[in-house]
Amino acid sequence: EAGVAQSPRYKIIEKRQSVAFWCNPISGHATLYWYQQILGQGPKLLIQFQNNGVVDDSQLPKDRFSAERLKGVDSTLKIQPAKLEDSAVYLCASSLRTSGLAKNIQYFGAGTRLSVL
Amino acid sequence: AQSVSQHNHHVILSEAASLELGCNYSYGGTVNLFWYVQYPGQHLQLLLKYFSGDPLVKGIKGFEAEFIKSKFSFNLRKPSVQWSDTAEYFCAVTGTGRRALTFGSGTRLQVQP
């Protein structure tokens, strides 16, 4: 079974530039998550999709971050304009289902390491 | 709001030593608990999970964890560590009202040969 695919693996940009990350979840997984992991911290949820609808984007800085999952499969996360504090690893995860207290196991991609100079 | 505390930020052990990593969570309802591991240069992988039933759960590579509801804890243990266990370990929790994971800040384990 193929895992969660993310690209690019690394990205270096200057502040105020824009950047986009791509994620392709495990086939058949309805739920997709984007997490931000700052050095020395645990991952923090940015946005969660169920199919192509947003379930939770309460921690997404909407003035500069946006995400979409138009066809309910792959997803793109964009930052525009980037700030120095956006330097982090951006992780994508997917899971099969989220109903009730279902046994929701999340599988993670390798992440995109962003450096903002 | 949910939160997870991992008290040990950096642990250094010799091979064959026993390991216990602490994890405490704050959440008022029913929880699912997880330990994820991140080996150097690799992605996060599930080590073990607790959903319900026996509070002592066993995972891959000889790891186990015990859910103690009264203490809001889910500590990770391994009787004898190996050099290959060198990695970062994250405790995480989800609750009924929130499907996404809330992670602790991680514990970096360094095993010396």
Image: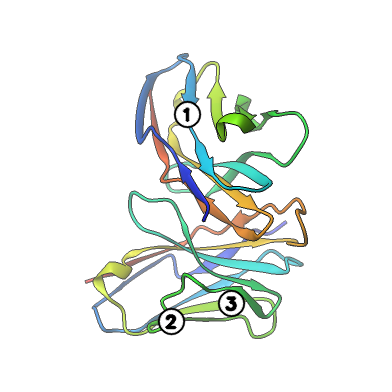
Pick the front one: B18 or A101 = A101
* Residue designated by label 3: A75
Task: Respond whether the residues carrying marks 2 and 1 are from the same subunit.
Answer: no
* Residue designated by label 2: A62
Camera-side mark, 3 or 2? 2
Q: Amino acid at mark 3?
A: Ser
In this rendering, the answer to whether B87 lies above or below A53 is above
Q: Secondary structure at mark 3?
A: strand
* Residue designated by label 1: B21
- Estimate the spatial distance between the alpha carbons at disc 3 and disc 2, rounded to whole Å: 16 Å
Q: Quadrant of residue A26?
A: bottom right
Q: Secondary structure at mark 1?
A: strand
The chain under label 1 reads: B
Q: Is residue B113 visible?
A: no
Please name the residue shown 48% across and 21% down the image. Answer: B19
**Pointer 2: residues within 10 angstroms few (<14), some, or many (20+)?**
few
Q: Secondary structure at mark 2?
A: loop
- Estimate the spatial distance between the alpha carbons at disc 1 and disc 3, rounded to whole Å: 35 Å
